[in-house]
Amino acid sequence: MSLQLVKTVEPCYDYVDVGTCWATPPSRWPSGYPSYYYPWFGSIYNAALVTCPKHFEEAFSNIYHFYYDPGSDTIRLNPTFSVVYWPGYAFKSISFDADGNYLSTWWGNFGDAWYQAYTSNGSAGSYGRIYGIRLGKNIVSLDPATANPDGVYANSLENWPGNPTSSFIIANVAAGYAVLGSGASLTFWRNIDAAPEKFSQLTLPFAMDYLCYESETIMWAIGTGGELAKINYQLPRLEMLSQVHNPDPTVQKYMLTFDTKRNRLVVFSQLPDAADGACQSKIEFYWPVNEPGTLTKPVPVNALRAGEQITFVAHLIGDAGEGIASALVQASLADPAHGSLITPQVTSEASGRCLLRYQAGEDDYTDSLTLSYEESS
Amino acid sequence: MLELTYIAPEATASANLAPHSLYFNRHWGAFFAFKSGTAFSRLFHDGTIKSTSIAGLGALRYMYPVAGGQGELYCCPWYLGNYPVYQTWPLTGTINDTVPTVGYLPNDVAASESKFFFDPARGIALYCASSSIAVHDAQTKTLIRSIALGSGTYRSLAWAWADTVFCADGNTGQVRFVDYQQGAVVRQGRINPFYAATFDCLLQVIAAIGTDYRMRIYSLDDIPADLSNPAAATPLGQAQASRLAVRLTDEQGVGIAAKWVVWSLAGVEGGPVLGSLEKVVSRTDADGYARNYYFGPLAGTGQVEVMCEAEI
C-alpha cells in the first residue's frame, strides 16, 4: 500500500490584507482602518507584520488542531494568530470544504484562545466527535466548531496506571481504546472508561508531529519529516510506512486528518510565510492505494537438480520494506521452457512473502523465471 | 559443503551491517540486519536491503538483539543490569517492555551480540563461547550443560528446528546444528566464510552475507563427493551376522547426513550370491555413516560382492 497524491491546495488560507505597510510602523493606527483596530488606544501590535514589505494583519502563531468534522463534512484548522491589533493575538477556527476550499472563519474570544492554548491535537473519534488532549493530562471532547472542551467526555490520565502524560491522543471512546503519543512512542490503552489498561506500545521510526483517527481499528501518524504511518491500534502493528509527496525541510509542522466520508488522508503543512507576509501553508489530499514497490528476485531454497521440485522465495514489499499482502504474483518461464511451473501464480502472504514451486526437467538446461504482480484491490 | 542455491549478483550495502548481526524474523519471513546493534534494516533473500530513513523501523539502542523462540527476536537492555530479556514487537523489532522480562542471559553477556539464544518455552538461555555452547537456566542463570562444538569461533546462534540451534564460524564457514536438550551436535556442514549469517527456520535455509558482502543462500543439501567402500566391523563368515558400514562425505571429508544408501549383493565372477543383507536401504547418520548387517550363508563358502549406491 502506498499513498497517491490527489490534490494540493496551496496556499490554503489568505491572511487578511491591511493594504498598507510602513518602513517604520507608527505606534498607533491612523484613521481609516477596520473598527476592531481601535479598542483602548488603538495601538499597533506585532508591528513586524506591517513592516514593509509585509502587509498582513495576521500570521499563524501556533496551530493546535487539524481535524475532519464528519458532522459538518468540513475540515477545521484551529490556529492562534499573531495580530496587529489589541491584544496582539487571536484565535480563529478556519473551516474548509472537503476539497480544501476555504469556507469561513469563526472568531473566538479570549476564553476561546485560552482553551485553544490548553487543548491540542484534536482528532475525530467515535460518535463522530472530536477528541483532544488538555494539558497533556485529560482526554476531552471538543466542540467541532470552536475546539472548546464541551464536557461530553473527560478522562483524566492521572488516574491511569503509571500516570501517563501525552502530547498526542487518539480517543476511541465507544470501543474503549485510546492511543497516547509522545515523541516517537505510542502507547495503546483499552477499557478507558472503567479500568484503563496499557496493553501495548510501539516505537515509530520517526518523531511524531500529529496523529489522526481513521476507524475503530486504524489510525495514522505523521512525522516531523513528513513520514506517514498507518497503524492498527487494536493489534497493534504498523500497517504501512510512507511519506508525503516531496517532503519540504522548511515545513514547520505537519498535521493530518482522515476524511472518513471519502476515505482519504488530508495533510496540512505549515510553511514559513512569504517575504511579504502572505500565507504559504498548504493542504494535500492522498488516497491510500495498493502500490507495491519492489518484487525481490526469486531465490531457490533447495537444490537445483534434474527432476526435482524446486521452491523459490520472493518478497513483495513497499517503499519502506513493508510486506504487501494479498497481491497476486505471477510467474512465467521464458521460451523455450524446459521445466514447468507447479504454481504459476500465488497470493502474497501477510509478510509479503511468496513461495513458488517449479518442476525441473531431466536434462541439463537453463530456464529463466520471471515474476510480476498485479494489485488485488 | 552445503549446497549454494543462490548468490546475489551485487554486494549488499555493507555500511548498513555490523559483522555477525543478522537475524531471521519469522513475522517478516526475512531478516533483520543490524548496524552496530542500534539501527536495523530489512534484508531479503535476494540481497535487497531496505534501510532508508523511513524504513529503519525502529532501533534497539543500548540493547543486544537476541535470537530466540522459533524465529523470534528478543532483546537485552544490558544497561539495566542483570541482563534481562524482553520480547520485541513482531513488526518493528523494538522492545516490548509492556510485559515482564521473560528471563535473563548469563553474565557473560558483556562478550558481544549474536552469541546468545533464548528459548522461552524451555526457559533456557544459550551462550556460545567460541568452541562450546553453555546452556543456562534463564531464571537462575545456573549452568545446565556445556556442549563442545570443536575448534573454531562459533556464533550467529539461531533457531533451526525443535530444540536445535544453528551456529557457524565465519572464518572457516563451519556450520553446526546443536540439540541443546540432548547436548550434542546433530548435524554439521560447511559454507563459504562469511561476514554475517543466520538460519531461516521457515524455509530451512542458511542465509549468509559473504566476505564480499554478497547474499548467499544455502540449502541443507550437502554435495556428496565420496562414498567409501563398505567396511565390515566383524569378518564375514558362515552363519554369522557381520556389521557393515559405508560413509558418505563431502569434498572436505565431512560426513553427509540423512541420505539414503542402497545396498545390494552380487556373486563374484559368475558365482552365486551368498548370504543376504538385513536392509536394502539405510540412511546416513550425523557423521555420514549408513549401516547394515550381512548374514552369512548357513552352508557353503565363496566370495560375495557388497555394493552400495548413494541416492543423490
Image (cartoon, coloured by chain):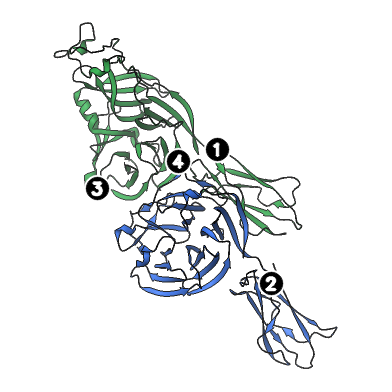
Chain colours: A green, B blue
Spot the residue most to the left: A40
Q: Nearer the viewer, mark 1 or mark 4?
A: 4
Compared with A373, A33 (above or below) is above
Q: Which quadrant, please, contains the C terminus of chain B? A: bottom right
- Label 1, on which residue? A377
For disc 2, the neighbor class at 10 Å (few under 14, some 14 to 19, many from 20) is some
Q: Amino acid at mark 1?
A: Ser
Is there CB contact under 8 Å for labels 1 and 2? no
- Label 4, on which residue? A241
Q: Which mark is first along the chain, 3 or 4?
A: 3
For this rendering, which residue is in front, A377 or A163? A163
Compared with A83, A255 (above or below) is below
Instruction: Quadrant for residue A74, please give it.
Output: top left
- Label 3, on which residue? A160
Residue A243 in picture, x, y percent from top left:
44, 36
Instruction: Give me the residue at 41% from left, 24% from top.
Output: A98
Residue A203 in picture, x, y percent from top left:
37, 46
For this rendering, which residue is in front, A223 or A127? A223
Label 3 secondary element? loop
For disc 3, the neighbor class at 10 Å (few under 14, some 14 to 19, many from 20) is some
Instruction: Give me the residue at 70% from left, 80% from top.
Output: B230
Q: Which mark is first along the chain, 3 or 1?
A: 3
Q: Which mark is first along the chain, 4 or 1?
A: 4
- How far apart are the alpha carbons under marks 4 and 2? 52 Å
Q: Are marks 1 and 2 on the same chain?
A: no
Q: Nearer the viewer, mark 4 or mark 2?
A: 2
Q: Amino acid at mark 2?
A: Asp
